[in-house]
Amino acid sequence: MNPSADPVDAVPLDQGPTSTRPDPESASSGAVGAAQAYLLGNGSVDHYRQALADGVERVARRVATVDRPFTGVTPDELAPLVGGIELDRPLGDHTTALNELDELWLRDAVWFHHPRSLAHLNCPVAIPALLGEAMLTAVNPSLDTWDQSAGATFIERRLIEWTAARIGLGATADGIFTSGGTQSNLHALLLAREEAVAHAADADTRSTLLPRLRILTSAAGHFSVQKAAKLLGLAPDAVITVETDAARRMCPQALDRELERCQRADLPVMAVVATAGTTDFGTIDPLPEIVGRCATAGVWLHVDAAYGCGLLVSPTRRHLLDGIEQADSVTVDYHKSFFQPVSSSALLVRDRQVLRHATYHADYLNPARAVAERIPNQVDKSLQTTRRFDALKLWLTLRVMGPDAIGALFDEVCHRAADAWALADADPRFEVVARSPLSTVVFRWCPAGTDAELADEANRHARAHLAASGAAMVAGTMVDGRAHLKFTLLNPATTSADVTLVLDLIAEHAGRYAHDHAPERSDHPANLSCSVA
Ligand SMILES: *Cc1c(COP(=O)(O)O)cnc(C)c1O
């Protein structure tokens, strides 16, 4: 909703803003006056400066002094603290509120700048982006319409052009910032669905077509594809999983088979979703092979580069994305591999015309005549209406640091992950899976001869123990039905010594667990599914 965009003269006088009406109760006028002091305005800039400086100081102190990525606090410990807060009784000043917040959150926060924060795709954040974040929320533009954003609209558009050029999408490309990869994928698949409907055989109507549309993605594709299919009204079995090879990349021959099978069954494939940086393995589907097949079959190719997009600025690894320039649409998450704070993501498309599938005009906001008047209303391209100026964070990052610096940082974490993979691979206590060209290491504690089920439990236990002690945050996942652990390295401050320490801790916790829970000794070879390293 954009009440601020309503023409003021359309509001009947007797329903006008409260402030224009005489207030019968002076007590409540006083309350408004006091409350107004909290609004950012020309009388409150000192308050604004002080409040933000104090908040920054609280975070800075924590960042400077935390010695572990996490305190190990449990939900049972924190829930009552937060639950006990009386939200209808304000504290009145930000110092007291910050003291309270320190107990509720900051003291036990998860710190992604810590070198042993290895779990998920959260990055340490670039300071120019934090500066952007503080500024964008204070000015508070909304990027839906020009009349709420002015120059912000052009800053966003320049970044879209810049990203599209980095991908190599060509002169007709366009796109839009989104809240994240999930939204970018949904948006891409909405466009693909509408294109499929637009190009359907004459006999088909939307209602005969939708239940038959299929999306092909690899077994390691992101689950947001499934969610998008559901939101788009497709059949429950609309997403077909294409087999991956031993390196966890989509197998092109398997893609051939699925395309053929769909064709034979008269199930139109509305999109192939290739993943450039799978969330679980950090592997990249063979884009050149997939591109060719999609072109031949006339199928929309969406590349989900939510994770791998950092390669766009990599000084030495850009070639890993070769083929992406042929995609019809691309998801990028700057908040993963561009060191941007959440949220910062975009959807790029090869042909800007397709964005019309999400265009609706509202008289109050973006009337159709605005298009003829060449007023740049970004809402015409977006699934969102009110939308943050997230682009400012990337803008300041590029203007202060530049793309090469971001690329060098991402390169460095890829390099360190390769070292970490080699460390685990050479260590007889661990088994590693698919080596990632990005920054992921998937492995499992499983010394030769360990019972596979016991090893599952031991790995889970080790992960929980690490988090509870706060010594390190590592992720867990399942690979071929077996519990595995995962490092996602996005912090150039993580050293080999950190990795060695964490591997030792995992082996220690898992080893102790396995020792304490070993079943009665049996010599069943069937139980010995861990190979000798
Ligand atoms: C993280 C991720 C997503 C989802 O992105 P969000 O920003 O978390 O919504 C989609 N695809 C891939 C490959 C991802 O790694």
Image (cartoon, rainbow, N blue to C red):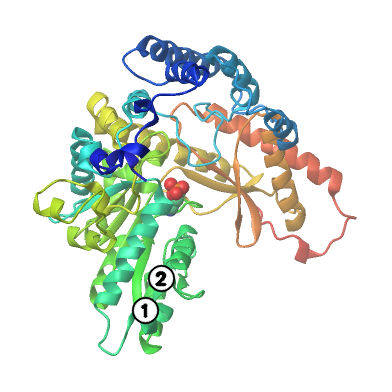
> x%, y% of residue 255?
38, 73
> x%, y% of residue 131?
34, 23
Q: Which residue is mark 1?
A: 259
Q: Nearer the viewer, residue 299 or 46?
A: 46
> x%, y% of residue 248?
47, 60
Amino acid under disc 1: Leu
- Element class at badge 2: strand
Q: Nearer the viewer, residue 294 or 17?
A: 17
Q: Which residue is mark 2?
A: 216
Residue 245, can we see it? Answer: no
> x%, y% of residue 395?
26, 32
Residue 195, can we see it? Answer: yes
- Element class at badge 1: helix
Residue found 39% across the figure and 12% down from its top: 49
Q: Is residue 506 left or right of residue 380?
A: right
Residue 270, located in which quarter of the rendered image? bottom left
